Image (cartoon, helix red, strand yellow):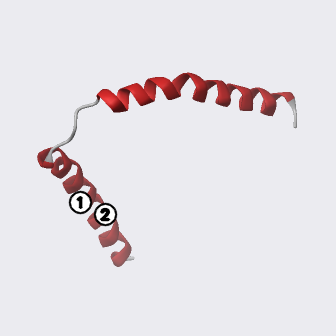
Amino acid sequence: MDWVQIGSALFLVAMLVFIFPRMRQSIKHSPRGNMQDWMGFIIPIAAVIGFVILLIMMV
């Protein structure tokens, strides 16, 4: 292991230590999604999956 890998590992651990409490607080205080919010997410994802399947079938 060289110094770059050790430094990267230390930076990653420090990042997790500092981000985790803020992430937990954000998740606790975030608004809950309703069905309309989920449909706004599911419909475009389904369209992309359908398009990818169409492209695979055309090959």
Q: Specify the quadrant that holds the N terminus.
A: top right
Which mark is drawn over residue 49?
2
User: Is 14 positioned to the left or the right of 37 in the image?
Assistant: right
For mark 1, give the secondary structure.
Answer: helix
Q: In which quarter of the image is residue 23?
A: top left
Q: Is residue 34 positioned above or below 23 on the image?
A: below
x and y percent of residue 29 in the render? 30, 27
Q: Residue at x 43, y 30 (%)?
A: 24
x and y percent of residue 32 in the render? 22, 38
Amino acid type of the residue tagged 2 in the rendering? Ile
x and y percent of residue 33 in the render? 20, 41
Q: Quadrant of residue 4?
A: top right
Q: Which residue is drawn at 80% across and 30% down?
A: 6
In depth, the one of 30 and 43 nearer the eye is 30
Q: How crowded is mark 2: few (under 14 residues within 10 Å), some or many (20 or more)?
A: few
Q: Quadrant of residue 14?
A: top right
For mark 2, give the secondary structure.
Answer: helix
Dots 1, 2 in contact, CB < 8 A: yes
Residue highlighted by disc 1: 47
